[in-house]
Amino acid sequence: MSVSPTTTDEPARRATGATVPVLAFAGIVVAVMQTLLVPVIKDLPRLLDTSSSNATWVLTSTLLSGAVATPIMGRLGDLFGKRRMLILSLSVMVAGALVSAFTDALLPMIVGRTLQGFAMGAIPLGIGLMRDMLPRERLGSAMALMSSSIGVGGGLALPAAALVAQHTDWHALFYGAAGLGVLAIALTLLVVPESPLRAKGSFDLPGALGLSAGLVLFLLPITKGSDWGWSSPTTLGLFAAAVVILLLWGLMELRVAAPLVDLRTTARREVLLTNLASIMVGVSFYVISLVLPQLLQLPSETGYGLGQSMVVAGLCVAPLGLTMMFTAPVYARLSARYGPRTTLIIGLLIIAVGYGGGLGLMNAAWQTVVTSVLIGAGIGLAYSSLPALIIGAVPASETGAANGLNTLMRSIGTSVSSAVIGMVLANTANDVGGVAVPTMHGFRVSFLIATAAVAVGLALAFFLPRRRPESTTQLRASSEEDANLARAEQALAGFRGRVLTTDGVPVARAKVTLIDRHGRQAGATLSAGDGSYALAVPAEGPYVLAARAAGHGPLAHSATHTGHRPVDLDLSLPGETVTA
């Protein structure tokens, strides 16, 4: 079954100046939902009348549902409409927030938080909408803002949630999240147009179930390993089951005509290395979010704690998100000049400087602000680069699913970070009257772990293919056809030539489609005014070039690409008029 991109019959509304802010606001709302309970984490056992180990399920459930929903919602958006799935994600989040707002019991709270986790799909869906609609001069900064919105919302939510939790009933947090979700839905309905691009094919339900099972079995022991014991039969058994299921899932996806995740595309060097680097960025982002609030709130009597209130601690960490937001336009300029690969490397270097300097900047509240600003700037640049690298390497019809997988990689990074740093802080803590108090040694080891993750990310980024900035015009083209033409014209390998009549007259705006041996569309473009066209090929092998234009009969021409040089191929359309 074909999975080629197509368009709906109805014309698409054009994006307005409010489209990007509204999509970014939706991303911020999702981040707020994730960070909502951070100020009251230590009080959850008392608030829910349960044990500490059971209370952690309130956070774990959100993580697991978000990890499962992200690639699935991305694929559903490619098939049925990204705006439609964005509204669905936000609606499920609102329902979950209301469930949590009306309960003090553990089980309904876990159900509500699980529903809230489904909103994580909003990030790749928003990026996909931007790619489909925005003109080239706006796309770079818009994607940067959307990608960094998860950090922006998290940074801004910390002081706001702390203020609410400190001065009113904690259920107000969920009422606020539901209200923000309703506002995001209303603005999306009013302002954001639906993308006309669709991927043909059906939804891969077995693939979705397999991926969901594998992710849950993998992430569950990561998040609960410190409670169960890393060498316990439960932990090791779940890891082993995850490996078996994910391997079987991968073999099944390679045989499905319309897979949930195209593993062949995911295995491309650029996509694979970008996803691995995303894990490292996710690790580095979460470390500072875990360490600085604890350092700021520890009593000064410890000799290293800074003795700040919950609200002040949130304000000191807030620059992490604010700086990420302000780096979006900076990223657009850097990426336009040097390309997203270079911007990713610059971002990772800034993160490394932030963590390295932070090792000696833990003695006053203002020093933590400096650390937050530096690391926020680096993470903002790194996060902004990731979707541009992914989009530059996948077909338009796979944008949602590919960015969903990339967002999932970041979530895996934060999950690993949470588990590892939680274990480090627990193992280095001092027991004071039965209470585990984190130590400065534990904080510094955590920063060193983050620095090591950044070093791995840098190594991966340096192995990404080096491209000239102008070769990424796919990200900045004003339409899908222009994007395909611009990418193909600068490709090292592909088909090129002219579309002509049988009399040798050039045919302008003829649709030329590249079909691979599996019957899938591998590219499409419109011929220029002189009939010229150019199409890149994803790999060597046999292809069919199909051409059609108004007033002419269709043409299908078989051709094989065997090397890294362009193949010159003119396409002659039959001259007879096609009647309706």
Image (cartoon, rainbow, N blue to C red):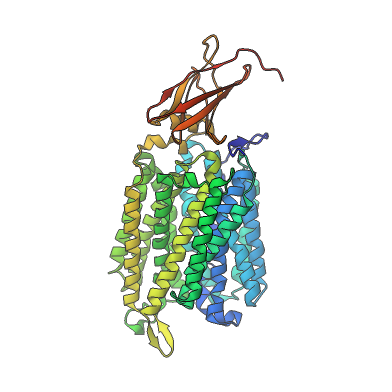
Q: Residue at x 58, y 46 (%)?
A: 256
Of 496 and 316, nearer the camera is 496
- Rendering quarter of residue 446: bottom left
Can residue 169 be seen in this snapshot?
Answer: yes
Q: Residue at x 39, y 52 (%)?
A: 382
Of 144 and 452, nearer the camera is 452
Q: Position of residue 234 (x, y in %)?
A: 51, 74
Is residue 105 left or right of 443 when viewed as pictured?
A: right
**Quadrant including the N terminus:** top right
**Quadrant including the C terminus:** top right
Q: Position of residue 293 (x, y in %)?
A: 42, 72
Q: Position of residue 187 (x, y in %)?
A: 62, 50
- Rendering quarter of residue 209: bottom right
Can residue 295 be seen in this snapshot?
Answer: no
On screen, residue 211 above or below 493: below
How many labels were placed on the picture? 0
Q: Name, please, the residue furthest toward the bottom.
A: 433
Q: Residue at x 42, y 37 (%)?
A: 472
On screen, residue 474 above or below 399: above
Q: Residue at x 41, y 74 (%)?
A: 423
Q: Position of residue 492 (x, y in %)?
A: 38, 31
Q: Name, please, the residue furthest toward the right.
A: 580
Of 80 and 123, nearer the camera is 80
